[in-house]
Amino acid sequence: MDYLSQSVGVREDQRRPVMPDDGSLPSRAPRIICVGLDGILVRTDTVVERLLAFLRTPCNWTSLWRWRTWGRAVVKRQLPSSTSFDLALLPYERTLIDYLQVQRACGRRLVLAAADRAVADGVNAHLKLFDEVIATDGIRNLKGRAKGDALATRFGPRNFTYVGSSSHDLPIWQQAGSAVLVNAPNRLHDKVANVTSVERCIDDRPSRVTSFLRALRPHQWLKNALVFLPVLTANALRDGSAWLEACVMFAAFCVAASAVYIVNDLADLSADRGHPYKRRRPFASGDLPLIVGLAAAPVLLVIGLALAQSIGTAHIIALYVACSLAYSIKLKELPLVDIFMLAFLYTMRAIGGAEASNYHLSPWFLAFSIFLFLGLATIKRVGELMHLKRRAIRTTARRGYDADDIAILQTMGVGASFVSAMVLALFIQSHSVAVRYTHPELLWLTVPLLLFWQCRLWLSTARGFMHDDPIVYAGRDWVSRLSFATALVIFVLARGFYSPAG
């Protein structure tokens, strides 16, 4: 019986892959290969990406509300064109592209059966791979059964191979002569094999659990340890309830910060893909579907607010999230505004710890933290610019700086670092320290120690070693850890081992 005319279903030979081991033309396979775009040829959803780019401007939100009843096809047409992101930087499924190139060399015809016409044509112009493009026309959305009917009408039932990745593609495979599965769930393989032959299974995407954990950026949680500073500076080392509430605040900041990191990654997809390191982030690389981030961010935010509410500090977390979102959406693009906002976000962690533990920060501590964190925020930005300069890149997307700004930023940042040491020295010689500490003269040792630590960070930045947040960098740097431990010992000795907590 001719392969294209045989009925679909349960024959054992239909369930076996028809792809030969040498990568040449599969036996009995249709000559036409139709390839889906979103989640298949590219490891992302271009419609969601365009929607996120559109929503980055708040005045566009009302437009989306008007479109809510128009249908997916019309919304696709109304969204910005493919120029809203760089098609060359999309996370393409390279293993599939290599496979398709081999099949085209064997004489098969390649068809891109995609979503929006502008995006599909742009992708094809970039890849120069497909012989034909079939896309949504703005009236009918080509997905699932509608796409299957369109392809069967165009090429004939069983006369095409379809490359897909999800259960939404099952109605298409029911009309296809064979199938290629790309990063499809294991449970889908048998369902597809029951309706058509499987040419090839491509599966090179890492575990979603692992990718999700990476998206939470747990290494960044080290910054939230700033919530413990008020307890330490108040000499309340023996106050168990204060430590417990500070721990809850730490957890609230960690969960809320992870929600903000996800939102930041979703808002910065194009910019991250143009960055030598950030392009490996789970959403930018396509390792994690965008819909996972859209669902996880609000859930994490609610958990963070609930934890903070349990100790009466939900307003701190709410303010932190609001400022962080403003930074992610717009403020990071404004020069100087971005580093002052970063410094404020650092300081908010210490303020949150003070609110949770009921050991409020003194004006001296606030002045010290403002200059310290301003210096650290500047280190972070200078580190990014130094790395780009070494790669002969003058500017980067969604940043208000270029390589020529490095010198002035270094001047401002180093100045802030030295001023923080001066404020610490003024605090040490104040009357409140003399009253609170048994041996206040020992605290003078922390001034050169703090200055040494910050100067080391600046030197590491100038030499190109600062690839991350400076506090995260310090957590991995043995000299920084030794400096922190030494400072803690100095504070304990200055307080007096047998002195009551004050």
Image (spheres, rainbow, N blue to C red):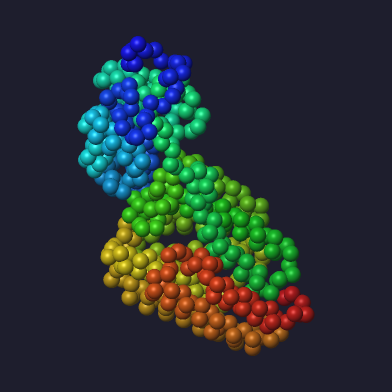
Relative vertical location of residue 317 with respect to residue 469 in this rendering, above or below? above
Relative image position of residue 497 (x, y in whole percent): 75, 80
> In screen coordinates, is 436 left or right of 476?
right
> In screen coordinates, is 495 left or right of 44?
right
Residue lying at the far front of the rendered structure: 22
Relative image position of residue 36 (x, y in whole percent): 34, 32
Relative vertical location of residue 326 with respect to residue 225 in this rendering, above or below? above
Relative vertical location of residue 419 with respect to residue 119 in this rendering, above or below? below
* Res. 264 in view: yes
Residue at the image position 44 percent from the left and 45 percent from the top: 287
Position of the C terminus by quadrant: bottom right
Residue at the image position 54 percent from the left and 84 percent from the top: 448
Position of the N terminus by quadrant: top left
Residue at the image position 43 percent from the left and 77 percent from the top: 459
Relative image position of residue 165 (x, y in whole percent): 41, 32
Residue 355, located in which quarter of the rendered image? bottom right
* Res. 347 in view: no
Residue at the image position 30 percent from the left and 47 percent from the top: 85
